[in-house]
Amino acid sequence: MDEKLLSIDSAVNELIKKAKEDGVETIFDRKENMKPCPMGEKGICCRICAMGPCRITPKTPRGLCGATADVIVSRNFARMVAGGAAAHSDHGRDIAHVLHMTSKDGNYKVTDEEKLKELAKRWKIETEGRDIYDIAHEVAEFALNEFGKPFGTLEFPPSLPEQRKKVWENLNIVPRAIDREVVTIMHSTHVGCTADADSMLNISMRTAISDGWGGSYIATELSDILFGTPIPRETEANLGVLEENQVNIVLHGHEPSLSEMIVLAAEDPELIELAKEVGADGINLAGMCCTANEVTMRHGVKIAGNFAQQELAVLTGAVEAVIVDVQCIFPALASLAECYHTKFITTSPKARITGATHIEFDEEKALESAKQIVREAILNFKNRKKEKVFIPKTKSHAMVGYSTKAIINQLDKVVNSHIDKPGTVKPLADCITSGVLRGAAGIVGCNNPKVKHDYGHVEMIKELIKNDVIVVTTGCAAQAAAKAGLLSKDARKLAGKGLATVCELVDIPPVLHMGSCVDISRILELVGLVAKQLNVDISELPVVGAAPEWMSEKAVSIGTYVVSSGIDTWLGVAPPVTGGPRVLEILTSEMENMVGAKFFVEPDPIKAAHQMIEKIEQKRKVLEEKF
Ligand code: SF4
Ligand code: MSK
């Protein structure tokens, strides 16, 4: 195994080497030995009932019940969407519960009152003369109702253009309640229900929309109300952010309700004193995966790395605790942590892992729980084995925290001399229509060992910015960009002339960090607002999306709602649908007639970037005729 072929990140390659020396295995070793099942890869294996599992082959073109390849593939795809939508939306629900828990003297408080009142007005909740916490509780109840209300349809945010809603109405894919859509997929995919690929994909779109414009959108908006709407701030990224002489705590997972409290706990003078008593200089927090995005956007907490680096953080031998909540956590961390002194601490009953230390995070006593967890980490410092410690030097400077509001404020600051509509996306829309920016791309998603680590993200982003396409990014893609220096303002030297000029004028990097995976709702908000500004549908904008290294069910839901929102989307890894010709035809062709966008699969990120640029130019031509 030549580690240089596995990642473009030198810190990763150094630690893969250390893994060999230490005699421990990582995902990179397991990938070598794993032969993916060719049936599973094509999506033509069905184990929905106990008459099977059935596999589609030339000799057995139907399952025992008569299900065709397309039926099986479409049901498997729909279940991936349901899994992803459930994960994101349940995250949103948890945040709504936390908002419901807020009080003046409690651990959780309202931070962005303005955003709370805006949302209350949108949902027709009285704000005049009311206590802010009464408003917060009613807003939380309204949000919670969106998950299971028995009648009506999803309450859409004002950023959704009317034209887009019409498209969905015509296709009958306007979501009802969020949970209801997930349940409908689970019901429709039960043995003996939907056996029609077209219908299955329509149901998938409706569920995915309930994630993007519902559950994820709620997660983002309520997190901002609770913990603050992000503003641009500086941070550093990669495993070099771990400190030799401090208690290193890696925060990994997704929901900010835990990580926000850990940030508070780590600032507690008593705990800092305790850290000094055990011989450390202090407490160093570092984020991983989407938790990293949440805490870096709001506090500048440094980023240890992305999805594929979680084991490597433990391998440094310098991490006292990896604290996780939900999603994207390798079960492998449990046995790996045993080879080092690291405590692997699970906190959520939704994600218990055999071999981990489980300290349940009690939101009713949030700070107390967080302090207990931090204390465990501090007390573990004495167990660190100096001879096992190796922290790579690599780290990069990055700007993070570009919420939609932050982007609008940034534009207002510089262009308000000739702006007739302050506080809007008009300057951004002007940059796009004038052609200074050719278009915009949202690059999101995970790492997947089928792609050289970070290569897909970084090469695609570089190619796009070189061609005057501004990039917005979330999730593990954002961390790949941060580590590669692409979130620094200096990266404008890699941008084309138009984008570089905008970056200089507006004082932004060419790649804007917009947050975690649920914060793709911020991207939807931004493109929706630009479309409304220009009075066009989202599908008419020169805007594209990509997930070059995706791996999770959440990514399948994201891709489906992004395409359903009218944004063409490029995948670097083929989804397990190639065994269903009709499914493939719908996803990569017919969706264009239905929702104005479709999926593209292109493993080469540079080729994909050029296809994206071509699409942007095609859309520009049509748009230019309109103006
Ligand atoms: Fe086989 Fe049909 Fe059962 Fe699937 S639902 S396992 S195809 S019999
Ligand atoms: S954390 S879903 S690996 S982006 Fe959101 Fe990263 Fe993908 Fe998890």
Image (cartoon, grey):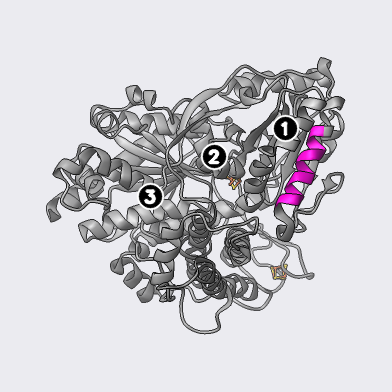
The numbered dot on residue 299 is 2
The amino acid type of the residue labelled 1 equals Ile
**Which disc, if any, is residue 506?**
none
What's the amino acid at mark 2?
A: His
Q: Real-space Cα distance between discs 1 and 2? A: 18 Å
Comparing 421 with 49, the one in front is 421
Q: Nearer the viewer, residue 547 or 117?
A: 117
Do the residues under discs 2 and 3 have CB atoms within 8 angstroms? Answer: no
Considering only vertical position in the picture, is 372 above or below 75? Answer: above
Instruction: State the separation of the CA atoms marked 2 and 3.
Output: 17 Å
Residue 404, numbered label: 3
Instruction: Say which quadrant the N terminus sits in.
Output: top right
Q: Amino acid at mark 3?
A: Thr
Secondary structure beneath disc 1? helix
> In the figure, 185 relative to 414: above or below?
below
Q: Residues within 10 Å of mark 1 (few under 14, many from 20)?
A: some
Q: Are marks 1 and 2 in contact (CB under 8 Å)?
A: no
* Residue numbers of the magenta segment: 367-378
Look at the picture and state if 360 lies above or below 155.
above
Give the secondary structure at mark 2.
Answer: helix
Q: Residue at x 61, y 41 (%)?
A: 289
Q: Is residue 473 visible?
A: yes
| Left or right position of 360 against 218 | right
Disc on res. 272? 1
Residue at 82%, 26% in the rendered image = 278
Tell whether circle 3 marks a residue whose Cβ is less than 8 angstroms from ligand 2. no
User: Whole-Å distance between the Cαs marked 3 and 1?
Assistant: 35 Å
Q: Where, by quadrant of the figure, is residue 349 drawn?
A: bottom right
Residue 31 can be seen in this image = no
Whole-percent x and y of residue 455? Answer: 52, 29
Which callout, 1 or 2, points at the residue further toward the start of the chain?
1
| Residue 284 percent coordinates (x, y) | 67, 30
